[in-house]
Amino acid sequence: MESIVKTIICPKCGKKQNFIMYPSVNVSLDPDLADKYLDGNLSILTCEDCGFSGIVEYPILYYDIEKKFSIFFSPDKTDHEAKIPDVLPVHLLPGMCLRLVHSSDDLREKIFIFRDLLDDRVVEIVKDSILREMNVRHEAKIPDYLYYAQDMFDCENRFLIFVPKKDEKYLGPIKIPFGTYEKIKMLMRGIWDRPIEGYTVVDKHWVQSAAK
Ligand SMILES: [Zn+2]
């Protein structure tokens, strides 16, 4: 896998450090690299001089030819139409889910969703309905975000696991019966008709405007 060595100035001691960046991760060719990325190991800089460690965010193109999805992570939030180099051969593009994300949490979530062969548009509505219900119940801790994490079987039941995040901290996981996802998928209107062209941000706002 192609990698680039970049010199980064340690924000603590000011000394120059070499940092290895992987601008693209092809999960089919290098599953170990993909796992390392998901564990966060590819975005941590540890200073060899003072031991400081911090997260370095840089654009990454993540793709899975087998499961047919490709996600471009751009830390620049103003970047709504990613100008992506033609990394993927044109013949691979038809039928690929292409997504643009602006945070590493979002990238991880999209990878988990597509890896589990779920539809991220439906997942957005599921998350929205979980948050609405929490609001109705006046729960003490309403998360700022929910992230899809895992598809899980427990005896005979299938669940989807979501990880809430509040004030930059992850909270205990929430289990939702798979039936809820299926029911919402059946009830969805409009979202199937809205075209997705190129690398697109598909989030709560995208789904809300498509469902109108
Ligand atoms: Zn340092």
Image (spheres, rainbow, N blue to C red):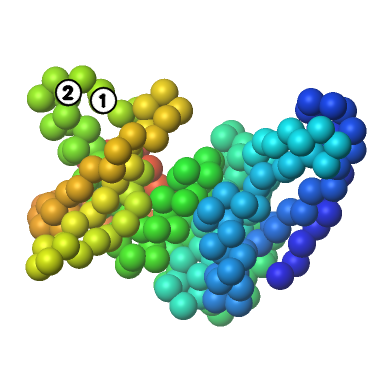
Say what amino acid the circle numbered 1 marks. Ile
**Residue drawn at 46 percent across, 78 percent down:** 66
**Residue drawn at 33 percent across, 65 percent down:** 116
Position of the C terminus by quadrant? top left
When the figure is inspected, residue 25 is found, relative to residue 99, above or below; the finding is: below
* Location of residue 84 by image quarter: bottom right
Position of the N terminus by quadrant? bottom right
Ligand 1 under 8 Å from disc 2 Cβ: no
- In percent of width and height, residue 177 lies at 13, 54
Q: Is residue 104 left or right of residue 117?
A: right
Query: Helix, strand or loop at disc 2?
Result: loop
When the figure is inspected, residue 196 is found, relative to residue 33, above or below; the finding is: above
The answer to whether any part of residue 98 appears in the image is yes
The answer to whether any part of residue 185 appears in the image is no
- In percent of width and height, residue 40 lies at 57, 49
- In percent of width and height, residue 34 lies at 56, 64
Q: Residues within 10 Å of mark 2 (few under 14, many from 20)?
A: few
Q: Is residue 203 left or right of residue 63?
A: left
- In percent of width and height, residue 11 lies at 78, 28
- Residue 139 — which label? 2
- Residue 142 — which label? 1
Query: Helix, strand or loop at disc 1?
Result: loop
- Residue 38 — which label? none
* Location of residue 146 by image quarter: top left
For the residues bearing labels 1 and 2, Cβ distance under 8 angstroms: yes
- Estimate the spatial distance between the alpha carbons at disc 1 and disc 2, rounded to whole Å: 6 Å
When the figure is inspected, residue 148 is found, relative to residue 78, above or below; the finding is: below
Say what amino acid the circle numbered 2 marks. Glu
Q: Is residue 205 left or right of residue 55?
A: left
Residue at the right extreme of this rendering: 15
